[in-house]
Amino acid sequence: MKGGPNEDAFRILTRPEQAMGLIDVGTIRSRVAEVDMFKKFLKEYRGGKQTPEKPTS
């Protein structure tokens, strides 16, 4: 998988510190959600988007 188009996804799903044999579907979904959330954060961070501040009064 090294150097392939799915290298990062493979590395996330098979990271050794949490992988103990085959992982279940729930774990995979959790990791995918984690990655999606981080990708959204990076996209917003790189784009300079800021969440509107609420008035304090």
Image (cartoon, rainbow, N blue to C red):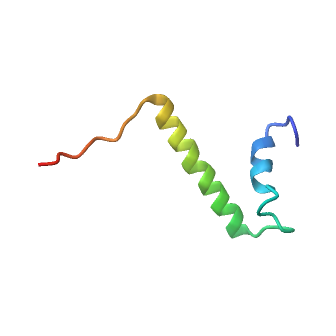
Identity of the residue drawn at 37% across and 37% down = 50
Identity of the residue drawn at 62% across and 50% down = 35
Depth check: 22 or 53 in front?
53
On the image, the x and y values in percent for residue 16 come to 82, 58
Residue 53 placement, left or right of 41 = left
26 in relation to 7, above or below = below
Identity of the residue drawn at 60% across and 54% down = 34
Q: How many marks?
A: 0
Residue placed furthest toward the top: 47
46 in relation to 28, above or below = above
43 in relation to 28, above or below = above
Give the quadrant of residue 19: bottom right
Identity of the residue drawn at 88% across and 43% down = 1
On the image, the x and y values in percent for residue 18 come to 76, 63
Residue 56 placement, left or right of 5 = left
On the image, the x and y values in percent for residue 53 come to 26, 42
